Amino acid sequence: MKKTILSGSTVTGNLTLGNYIGAISNWTKLQNEYDCLYFLADLHALTVQQDPKILKDRIYSFYAQYLALGLDPQKNTIFVQSQVPYHTELSWILTCLTPMGYLNRMTQFKEKAERHVKNVNAGLFTYPVLMAADILLYQVDMVPVGEDQRQHMELARDIVGFWENRYGPGIFKLPEAYVGKVGARIMSLQDPSKKMSKSDDNEKNFIAIIDDPKVVEKKIKSATTDSDTVVKYDLENKAGLANLMNIYSVMTGKSFEEIEKLYEGKMYGHLKVDLAEIVVSTLTPVREKYLDLMKNQDYLDKLMNEGAMKAEARSEATLKKVYEATGLVPRKR
Ligand code: ATP
Ligand code: LTN
């Protein structure tokens, strides 16, 4: 039996190089060995205010980006969260088992509440419970995520404990987080003290997977570095350069030592020019495939439907058991 993997990305902004390196490149590697479910967390996106028209376009765009980045709809179940209603049903039941104190500790909630002071809604607070439901519905073994999601993964495991204390064992599998060793945290280009985030208001902070090659070049060239000139990996004193070296290393397979050697006696500018070329050559075919897919919305609709049907069929059994255990009466079909 193949192990089951599930992961998702919130439908906000545009997928970035950080998402690709930290998450989606791992997903594409895993798709051959494991039984994988990958989804668009569009309901999670609603925790911050969304323009309906933009959200809708983005759902198609993200789906096309998943495909363009190499996720195969034949090998994987690729679906849109809101198209499988069991996620929200399970989420409610789990919300009623999760102590507020646990949610209060979530650093992402604290950060987002600070960033969206005018819209600190209850969904932002209960976001990690919906994430736990996404995972627990499918009896998942492993969840490949970036470093920033570790805490939410711990909570998902705690929620299995809350459930079992109340209703007993045997329904949910305890999921493990899978955080890649390299590239787990790509930082913002202008402010390397914070992570590259796709919903950043300043576009210069991130490279979008579908950015025009010229824009990619510009963003890399204007990335913040320091006033020194020696190319040396030093996270503490040269955080901006370290971030560029990290991206360089992940995308070429070269170690930091190899990169340092390569740029001995050269300026940061040389490294930036080469890095821009490396990133552009990786992203160009993805962008072309993406633009092609976006011309055919019917095809995307068809794949989304198939994905949702597969996901629904797979999660039905868990939800039925949950209804039985909690004393709810499932509708007879
Ligand atoms: P947002 O800014 O909207 O919160 P995000 O860029 O953090 O978005 P998510 O949808 O939260 O993206 O994350 C999708 C996946 O990408 C997660 O597994 C997450 O850990 C990973 N990821 C996000 N940003 C980075 C980053 N800078 N470096 C490495 N991995 C990342
Ligand atoms: N919170 C995640 C997106 C997400 C997710 C999930 C990831 C929602 N549900 C389930 C893995 C498994 C994020 O990356 N921001």
Image (cartoon, grey):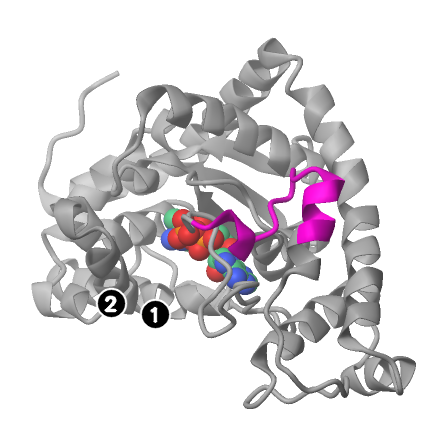
Vertical side of 87 occupied by 309: above or below: above
Magenta span has 90?
A: no
Q: Which mark is residue 106?
A: 2
Q: Judge the density around disc 1: few (<14), some (14-19), many (≥20) Cα neighbours within 10 Å.
A: some
Q: Position of residue 206 (x, y in %)?
A: 55, 53
Determine the residue positioned at 26% across, 42% down: 48
Q: Are marks 1 and 2 in contact (CB under 8 Å)?
A: yes
Residue in view at x 58 percent, y 58 percent: 18
Question: From this viewpoint, which residue is outermost toward the front?
Answer: 227
Q: Position of residue 236 (x, y in %)?
A: 54, 90
Q: How many marks?
A: 2
What's drawn in magenta, residue-wise?
202-218
The residue to which callout 1 is attached is 151
Residue occupying image coordinates x 12% and y 31%: 329
Label 2: state its secondary structure. loop
Q: Where is residue 30 in the image (x, y as percent from the top left)?
A: 67, 54
